[in-house]
Image: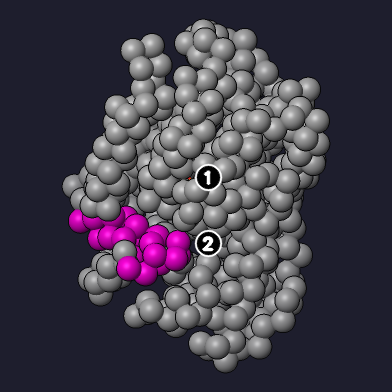
Amino acid sequence: MARVVIVSNRVPKPGVEGPAAGGLAVALADAIKPGDLWFGWSGSIAKETLLTPRVVTAKGVDYATIDLSKDDYEHFYVNYANSTLWPLLHFRPGMVTFERADYEAYVDVNRSFGHALKPLLKDDDLIWVHDYHLIPLARILRKLGVKNRIGFFLHVPFVPASLLETLPNAVETLKELCNYDVVGFQTERHTGDFRDCLRRMMGYEAEPGKPVKVKGHSVLPLACPIGIDADAFAKIAMRAAKAKDTLRLIESLAGRAFIIGVDRLDYTKGLPNRVEGFSRLLERYEEHRGKVSYLQVAARSREDVVSYQELKRELDRAAGEVNGKFGDYDWVPLRYITRPMARNTIAGFYNVARVGLVTPLRDGMNLVAKEFVAAQPPDDPGVLILSEFAGAAEEMTEAIIINPHDADSITEALHKALTMPLDERKERHQALLAKVRASSAKAFCDRFLGALEELPKAAAA
Ligand code: ADP
Ligand code: F6P
């Protein structure tokens, strides 16, 4: 297969095995192979946005990154990407802010990405662009004379036309996406919404599974669920379950049932409702008082975005309130940590958890749901509680599916999970594990890159 060039705003620190909160970096790290190139933002701020990338090679993969200027970081990353597109694509139009100047800076940063990337490209590379930060990149690369096939994968949800059209530059955004050869989405539903937008807002005929003809060019909308390497993660979890951190955790639980939630501290993850659902469990079902321990790891994320700062204050308060109300001198019901945790440690914690709580208000896929299932011991598995609004719910129907807007549904699901007989737990887990194994990181890459590679050269020129 040709060399794959992954382009994404977030790039993992090469060679660093430490904590990485964020599905994109985690899933692609499972998929990338020696010889490939990963290009993106270094995560650092410099005096100016630099067009000469720094290249570091680790385990045979080249990582090429550029710094952003403070202005670009603010207008491109904090504002347009994470205060316009992120809330819109997560069905939160009330939280969207839009400024033309931010959009202009967003396109400029994409231009800088294009100029910095161009000299690194070889003729037969497959270029694979990731996520909402980089929608205009295909047009920019084409303008610079790049003839390679270029694919785009959206890690977050895609919205129906009635929502997308609230974005002042919605049609322009669709046009930008149509410059790619393949545009991938996490679920069939989002792919269908994209086709529907093309039809309603641009008048293009778009049939399921078929490329759409757009002014002499074809773009293929593709549903392509992202996944993890389940067997490798299971191995890590089994090993980690016997390691020091998990043993310390087990000792501290003193026989209590363990509930776990692992997220970035993000308003899309439904964290306040989750804490409220847990609080009502203790209120309504007295038998669980003193008998359960809930660990919520909520890694601070996008701390320069005001709504994230507000969420942190809200969650700090809610966590304190539950513990103040129900805690005892020898029992802390909710353990709340706002730092990322090492991946191995988390894997061991999933392994010993009785319940995995995954309750986003909206999520492209949600890899935590898949990791939790992969990490469970098959002879005594825990139970996954999953929001119907996570992309993962399209496949993982044997979880307890809840509506995260309804705190009572989280409460009832927790009670059901904590009292579920072993046979039912095993049955659900077996079915879920088969699905997690089938939709692996490799299957995701093969499906997407296979579709991109199959295109006739002419379609890419
Ligand atoms: P998102 O991409 O929106 O962050 P996902 O659930 O798809 O959500 O992916 C999150 C990834 O980051 C998972 O692999 C998860 O294990 C990891 N992660 C999330 N929160 C934390 C955390 N607090 N500490 C360490 N890793 C985390
Ligand atoms: O998976 C969605 C996503 O936005 C990724 O694009 C991103 O890497 C991750 O969440 C974490 O967010 P950020 O890169 O802003 O820290």
Q: Which residue is mark 2?
A: 157
Q: Is residue 106 above or below residue 143?
A: above
Q: Main secondary structure of the magenta part?
A: helix
Q: How is the image coloured?
A: one colour
Give the residue furthest to the bottom. 203
Q: Position of residue 38 (x, y in %)?
A: 52, 45
Q: Are marks 1 and 2 in contact (CB under 8 Å)?
A: no
Q: Name the kind of residue labelled 1 in the image.
A: Ile
User: In the figure, is residue 137 to the left or right of 2?
Assistant: left
> Would residue 220 be found to the left or right of residue 74 on screen?
right
Residue at position x 52%, y 20% in the image: 291
Q: Which residue is mark 1?
A: 410
**Residue 81 among those drawn in magenta:** yes
Query: Start and end of the magenta stretch?
Result: 71-94
| Residue depicted at 53% across the width and 61% down the height | 157
Magenta stretch encompasses residue 85: yes
Q: Quadrant of the C terminus?
A: bottom right
Residue 185 image point, x, y percent: 61, 62
Rounded to the nearest whole Å, what is the CA distance between mark 1 and mark 2? Answer: 22 Å
Q: Secondary structure at mark 2?
A: loop
* Nearest the eye: 180 or 332: 332
**Residue flagged by tag 2: what amino acid is it?**
Pro
Could you classify mark 2 by the number of other residues whose Cα lies within 10 Å: few (under 14), some (14-19), or many (20 or more)? many
Q: Secondary structure at mark 1?
A: helix
Of circles 1 and 2, the one toward us is 1
Task: Indicate the position of residue 6 as horizontal and vertical percent values.
Answer: 55, 50
Q: Nearer the viewer, residue 386 or 151?
A: 386
Q: Position of residue 90 (x, y in %)?
A: 45, 61
